[in-house]
Amino acid sequence: MNDKNENIVEVLITQEAIRQRISQMAEEIAAAYRDCLPLLVGVLKGCVLFMSDLVKQIGIPLEMDYIAVMSYGGIHRPTGAARITKDLDCVIEGREVLLVEGIIDTGMTAGYLLRNLEARQPRNIRVCTLLDKEVRRIVKIPIAFRGFKIPDRFVVGYGLDFRQLYRNLPYIGVLSDEVTGLDRNQGTKIFL
Ligand code: IMP
Ligand code: MG
């Protein structure tokens, strides 16, 4: 798995760099929440590898829950429309919530989730993302904990997919345009 996949044109962030950054982030998170019991809400499925490595390094008690959202549109045509496909099991009213994302791109998905979760009246809600594709931002998102800022490239691995593939790569890699470009002229039902 450490050998570069043939469709990966560049390894953007190595396994070791991810590991190091996550332990720094975990320390920051533990310090920020040391006086309360935070609820980490992972956004499926992109968060899964990141969140499992992250929580192992956070040395304070915490709870975990997950939410899944389907965004309509595609890499080349984000629409901002989204729908929750798996809701939280927990009630978050009065809780300190940390939303954990694998990547924030246009910010539409995180914006939708923040609005939805804020309506449930948590005590506080903050955002943590491994990757931030800041140059593509349309909806402003306050990011409290960020792993890496990345350029405007389509990346996969470490939980992130292209059509459900590549999530199990242990690094973050740039996927070749020949693979992602297949979507360019298709309709709107492309789910990232
Ligand atoms: P948004 O544009 O911030 O709403 O991001 C929507 C979703 O698109 C993210 O949560 C990811 O699932 C996916 N996404 C955006 N950019 C990438 C990428 O470079 N690789 C894989 N998935 C991505
Ligand atoms: Mg996806």
Image: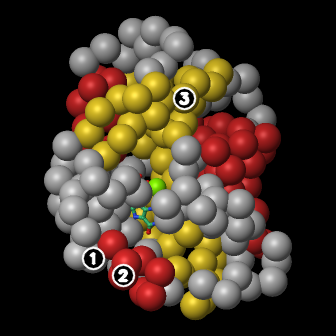
Q: Is residue 133 left or right of residue 159?
A: left
Write down the residue under mark 3: 66
Write down the residue under mark 1: 184
Residue 26 appearing in the image: no
Q: Which comes sooner in the sequence, label 3 or label 1?
A: 3
Quadrant assignment, res 130: bottom right
Write down the residue under mark 2: 181
Please tell me whether residue 123 is drawn above or below residue 186 in the rendered image.
above
Q: Is residue 48 left or right of residue 129?
A: right
Label 1 to label 2: alpha-carbon separation: 5 Å
**Image position, residue 127 (x, y; %):** 42, 42
Q: Which comes sooner in the sequence, label 3 or label 2?
A: 3
Disc 3 marks a residue whose amino acid type is Tyr
Q: Residue at x 54, y 61 (%)?
A: 161
Disc 1 marks a residue whose amino acid type is Arg
**Image position, residue 87 (x, y; %):** 44, 21
Q: Residue at x 59, y 62 (%)?
A: 165
Q: Residue at x 50, y 65 (%)?
A: 162
